[in-house]
Image (cartoon, rainbow, N blue to C red):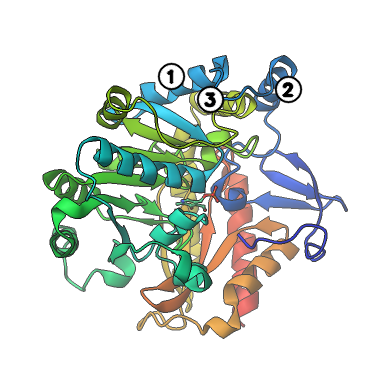
Amino acid sequence: MSHVFHRSLTAAYPVAVGGDGPYLIDASGKRYLDACGGAAVSCLGHSDAAVIAAVQQQVGQLAYAHSSFFTTEPMEALADFLVARAPEGIDSVYFVSGGSEAVESALKLARQYFVERGQPQRRHIIARRQSYHGNTLGALATGGNAWRRQQFAPLLIDVSRVSPCYAYRNQQPGETDAHYVARLGRELEQQINELGAENVMAFIAEPVVGATSGAVPAVSGYLRQMRDICQRHGILLILDEVMCGMGRTGTLFACEHDGVTADLICIAKGLGAGYQAIGAVMVSAAIRDTIRDGSGFFQHGHTYIGHATACAAALAVQQQIEQRDLLANVRAMGDLLQQRLRQRFDTHAHVGDIRGRGLFVGIELVQDRASKQPFDPALRLHARIKSRAMQAGLMCYPMGGTIDGQHGDHVLLAPPYIIDSRHVDEIVDKLGMAIDACLQ
Ligand code: PLP
């Protein structure tokens, strides 16, 4: 997610000119196995014929119509498709152009909901320390990544933070999942009480944490506990599934795994799979009804809301995933990937943890397995691994995150849902080589 200024600072990167299934091809003809979907985006690879045809068809028919004048067939069809498969209680969708916009929209929907219900004092957001919710100011304020927030701090609204559910780092030896969940629940309750429950608007969390710590699933029972606490205090639960949603973890919505629903669910990356830029907020009936029967108007908007071509692309993507039963492949290849990674790294001195769900897998690197001491950030280990892997023709997503104030390197893997066992072998071989080369 390094953001470069095009035409001035991109010279160091190869020029991508084509795609072939899970491979990207550069101008010299070199092929790169995309083991991270860019940033967990390209879930159908780079040459899906059905999606390309749908985009071409839609552009030919009607590329775009502004949402304050018209709705469109692809937007309505995509909304119907998603709502029919959404967790309980969700029954409408607000389409935007990406993940940060989805999070901004969810925060504003939550706020407007309480204003229209006569509770304007509800304005506090509680988030988790280990989180990333986007780079626009509201989303950045909400996320817990200190490095990303640092220089913009004076511009950011106040957000309260609690511990993430991060078993490898924070679950105490001998502590059962139930006790760990109860401890995290008490911490959230305490935070709510300090703010005054009547002042709290929303609690936001990623069901499986992505960019900040590399595919960390919550332990069993955690999301249910957080949901119950929010409900008890009349606080909205926002699940940020921008990275982990849309099949990435083996269920269409990541929270299905926990049997939990939310008031607002943000989705993006796997929605359009990179064929078009699109995100969305899935909205509960209660929020939709409050606004529809109140002011009748969500006080928000962007030029490209419900972009017809983006919706047509996303609908084709979702139909492909369903018709080809790709979620079964996500689960099977995800299990195989974790198994092969364990075979390769289980005795590796610097691989502290391998975790994840479906084709969303993280590897945490440590100086020492016993103490879990991270590497010195000055080594820029993650950046070196990325570069070695690219040399070997592998795209992976290493990050140097912050682990409760400490630096920590991890590698995130999020390959397309279409991979087979040969691709799994290629990922493990090339990644193993890149990690070894950087740690010698
Ligand atoms: N939320 C989560 C969980 C993300 O991982 C990201 C991006 O990585 C975002 C929000 C922001 O999405 P975007 O980069 O599309 O604005």
At label 3, which amino acid type do we have? Arg
The total of numbered circles placed on residues is 3
Q: Is residue 368 left or right of residue 66?
A: left
Q: Which residue is mark 3?
A: 324
At label 1, which amino acid type do we have? Asp
Q: Nearer the viewer, mark 3 or mark 2?
A: 2
At label 2, which amino acid type do we have? Gln
Q: Is residue 383 left or right of residue 169?
A: right
Residue positioned 75% across, 41% down in the render: 19
Residue 115 x, y percent position in the rendering: 26, 40
Q: Around disc 2, counting alpha carbons within 10 Å, would you say few (fewer than 14), some (14 to 19), or many (20 or more)?
A: some
In the displayed structure, 371 sits above or below 70; it is: below
Residue 18 visible within the image = yes
Which numbered circle lies on residue 56? 2
Choose the circle earlier in sequence order: 3 or 2.
Answer: 2
| Quarter location, residue 416 | top right
Q: Which residue is mark 1?
A: 80
